[in-house]
Image: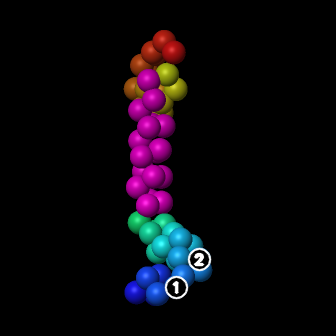
Amino acid sequence: MLAHHIERGKWLWRLCFFMPFLLPSTVAANLWQWLFNPGTGMVNHVLGIDTPG
């Protein structure tokens, strides 16, 4: 309601409201991508799988 009635800086209020919802999913996606990277992923290192890359 507050962001709807403010004319100046509306995008900032919306960003401050939605950032806590967007940030954890972005961090989780990057973490999974890092773990399962075919060339340098942590899972490949732990399992001893050597993939070309």
Does 24 appear in magenta?
yes
Residue extending farthest to the front is 7
Residue 20, position in %: x, y?
46, 68
Do the residues under discs 1 and 2 have CB atoms within 8 angstroms? yes
At horizontal 46% and vertical 45% (from top left) the residue drawn is 31
Q: Secondary structure at mark 1?
A: loop
- Predominant SS along the magenta part: helix
Q: Residues within 10 Å of mark 2 (few under 14, many from 20)?
A: few
Q: Amino acid at mark 2?
A: Gly
Q: Residue furthest top?
A: 52
Marks 1/2: CA–CA distance: 7 Å
Residue drawn 47% across and 52% down? 27
Asked whether, in this view, residue 21 is left or right of residue 6, the answer is left
- The label number, if any, that marks residue 9 in the structure image: 2
35 w.r.t. 28: above or below:
above
Which residue in the protein does label 1 denote?
Answer: 6
The answer to whether residue 39 is visible is yes
The span shown in magenta is 22-38
**Figure disc tally:** 2
The structure residue drawn at horizontal position 59% and vertical position 80%, both measured from the top left corner, is: 8
